[in-house]
Image (cartoon, rainbow, N blue to C red):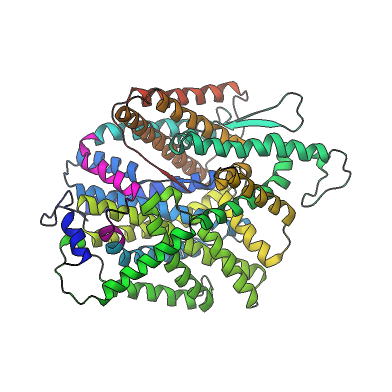
Amino acid sequence: MNEQQKSTAKFVPYVSASRSLPELTVVAVVLGIILAVVFAAANAYLGLKIGLTVSASIPAAVISLAVLRGVFRRKSILENNIVQTMTTAGEAVAAGAIFTLPALYMWDLNPSQQMVSFIVLVGGFLGVAMMVPLRRLLIVNEHETLPYPEGTACAEVLVSGETGGRSARMVSLGFVVGGLVKALGDGFMLFKTEIETNVLRFKNAVIGMDTYPALLGVGYIIGPRIAGQMLAGGILAWLVLIPMIGFFGAGSVGAIAPSLTPIAELDAWGIWGDYIRYIGAGAVAAGGLITLVKTLPMLFSSLRATLKGLMQRSSSNEKTTIDRTNRDIPGGWVFAMIAVLIVLLAFDPITNVGILGAIAIALFGFLFVTVASRIVGLVGSSSSPVSGMTIATLLIVTFLYKLTGMSGMTGMVTSLTVGAIVCVALAVAGDISQDLKTGYLVGGTPWKQQVAMMIGVLVSGLVIGFILNVLNSTYGLGSEQLSAPKAVLMRLIVEGIMSENLPWDLIFIGASAAVVFEFLGLNSLTVAVGIYLPVHISTPIMVGGLVRWIVGFFSRKNESLHKSRVETGTLLASGLIAGESLIGVVIAILIWSGVQIPSSVAVTTNTLPFLIFLIVTFLLGFISLRSKNGITENHKG
């Protein structure tokens, strides 16, 4: 008996291979399509605002349980598994797109929806196809060694489906509260959604807060340690660096590059926009590369183990009967799809990446998809160095294009396109790895999940271009409203290599700061994001982290109680994020379509928005502490 047979014999899924339940049904596909679009839009908005996206698998599983079991009275756990698989496709597509493609809008190119969709669809399909041959090796053969935390947690939710009703109410409550606050604040303009104050007798020192429930929810999900490190970066920027630059530049008569205005005439926001964002970008770039370097041992070992396993499979001539729970999309179809996509990229007139770009996508795609699929199995999607791998791809590809004579805007767009395709492929591969783990545990049919993921990628890819165009037309990608931090970073990397006109001193200052953070034992990338973003975003995230800490403190003597309270709070927080983010997209669509909304805020004081934020904070903490049931979630970025 070979290793694969041993592994399969040891494990019996929740729904055994001999049973056949409804799975890839019309009802499941329709619900999955709806949720994929919803979570794609919500995560696109959230990611453009703070540079992080939130995993959709648990909320999707809960919603599918509530709808399929509660409304349609359907009892198949495998249908629920298909729904959550399709939903995570929307989240993954949004993550890969917003981390890279907004740079095209910042260059005032305004890419067509067709171009954006083509880039995203090719990357998404490659991510699914390249993961298919790895499933038996990573999910089945290494079931005991690769836990896939999000996938395992989602399986637990599906198996304990009787809690779906109460859990769905938590998501729904958060959705309503988050959406209502967003609609009243930024839709009807009844109150401000940003408050700030100067620090007394401390020139250019500003502290502020965006009073958004979504940011509170993000802080709760990521926890106090990560939120605290993010706020540390914000405090360093707004209470140290900005006042310092203002102090030393107070006597300057002329402007100091890259600013076009003398420092003495700049306020805190002006200094942040002209100087701190470059320092933050350098820190984020260095933090991403440091994260990648730290995972190099795992990267090489993962690649070696994966290639060894694939060679052992290909050299085995043993005939085995493949049961339902072990059937993938046929290998011939998979490799044909990959070949067609690569050839299409080499010659298509839409992206113009050429043969060099197509080869780079094939090589980096296979390399990093392999690494991402294994790393998320060990440490979860939240710790997968997607940004670092995308940065590495951009650095190499941009340099190669420049060496071959492709420069200027053409070279920059082509380089970014290659990076975007690889980024989407990585995000999708990591998510489908978690989904296939869930399917393995509950007894899903792999090829049906893989088809469901492709449907989710297709639908999400077709709408993401429209979403980005609307958000850019309404708010401006890279603006104060939607800062798109990861995409700005990718833009700076490509511009820096191609044009060599960046303020390198500021970028190197940020990169050096990231190294210091790492030596201090901090997560350099997290602190760097805090420097790059306004402190107004980090502050409410820290409040959410404190609520999570308080819940943990009052539950520390009872592990099961602690888990259940955190789980319920996480579902409520996920609802806050989804509700607010989706209403933000709806408001953008209304403005884009010509609907008139109030142009000025009705109540301009800081008191009302601060009071509303406190009420939502109290609600999150109160419901969490009262809970005896819940489900866990993770973040990624």
- In the picture, measured across the screen, residue 453 lies left or right of residue 241, that is left
Q: Nearer the viewer, residue 84 or 521?
A: 521
Residue 426, picture quadrant: bottom left
Q: Position of residue 279 (x, y in %)?
A: 68, 48
Query: Magenta span: helix, strand or loop, mainly?
Result: helix
Q: Nearer the viewer, residue 36 or 50?
A: 50
Let me know if residue 143 is in the magenta part: yes
Which image quadrant: the N terminus?
bottom left
Q: Position of residue 419 (x, y in %)?
A: 53, 64
Is there any visible trace of residue 267 in the rendered image? no
The part of the chain drawn in magenta is 138-163
Identify the residue shown where x is 73% and y is 61%. 501
Q: Position of residue 477 (x, y in %)?
A: 58, 50
Residue at the extreme left of the image, as rendered? 18
Let me know if residue 377 is in the magenta part: no
Is there any visible trace of residue 596 in the rendered image? yes
In the image, residue 98 above or below residue 168: below
- In the picture, measured across the screen, residue 68 lies left or right of residue 249, that is left
Identify the residue shown where x is 25% and y is 38%. 66
Q: Position of residue 360 (x, y in %)?
A: 50, 72
